[in-house]
């Protein structure tokens, strides 16, 4: 697993936020709710909306297009949606917020 610093400590706000970051060629959505940080894919699987334009309700990230909801911890969609989003491990360290990106198990020669 590669750990990548996506937000230096000086750029982390004390208030809740939703932001987009580029990590290893992926556009991810970083969410801060209270003292917790989450990293999820930024594209809604239902209609392709930019999830960083959505909002949070009761631990769920809500899509701005059709209001699909995704659990920030598990990525699962609400009952009946039949979809999910990818989640990534997050660590707050002394120098910033890190996201863990798994290396692919296969490589091109």
Image: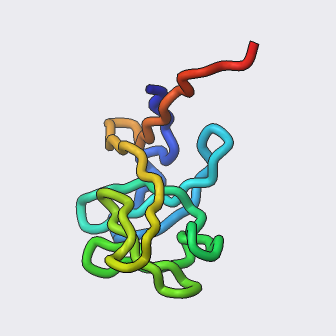
Q: Quarter of the image holding residue 13?
A: bottom left
Residue visible at 57% across and 60% down in the picture: 20
Q: Identify which residue, 35 or 81, lies in the foreground.
A: 81
Q: Is residue 89 above or below residue 15?
A: above
Viewer-nearest residue: 85 or 19: 85
| Colour setting | rainbow
Q: Quadrant of the N terminus?
A: top left
Q: Which residue is drawn at 58% across and 85% down?
A: 65
Locate the C terminus and report the quarter of the image it occupies: top right
Task: Give coordinates of residue 75: x percent, y percent.
Answer: 38, 60
Residue at image coords 47%, 60%: 85
Above/below status of 63 relative to 31:
below
On screen, 22 above or below 60? above
Residue 4 in picture, x, y percent from top left: 50, 34
Tell me what residue is drawn at x 25 percent, y 78 percent. Answer: 58
The x, y position of residue 8, in whole percent, is 47, 44
The tally of labels here is 0
Q: Which residue lies furthest to the top in this view?
A: 109
Residue 62, by quadrant, is: bottom left
Which residue is situated farthest in the right direction here? 109
Residue pushed farthest bottom?
Answer: 66
Residue 21 or 77: which is nearer the viewer? 77
Would you place residue 46 above or below residue 36 in this image?
Answer: below
Splitting the image into 4 quarters, where does residue 33 fall? bottom left
């Amino acid at each position: 697993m590669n750990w990548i610093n996506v937000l230096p400590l000086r750029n982390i706000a004390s208030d809740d936020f939703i932001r987009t970051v580029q990590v290893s060629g992926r556009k991810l959505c970083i969410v801060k709710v209270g003292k917790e940080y989450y990293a999820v894919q930024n594209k809604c699987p239902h209609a392709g909306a930019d999830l960083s334009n959505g909002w949070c309700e009761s631990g769920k990230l809500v899509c701005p297009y059709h209001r699909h909801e995704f659990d920030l911890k598990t990525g699962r969609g609400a009952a009946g949606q039949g979809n999910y989003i990818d989640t990534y491990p997050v660590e707050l360290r002394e120098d910033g917020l890190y996201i863990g990106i798994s290396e692919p198990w296969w490589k091109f020669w």
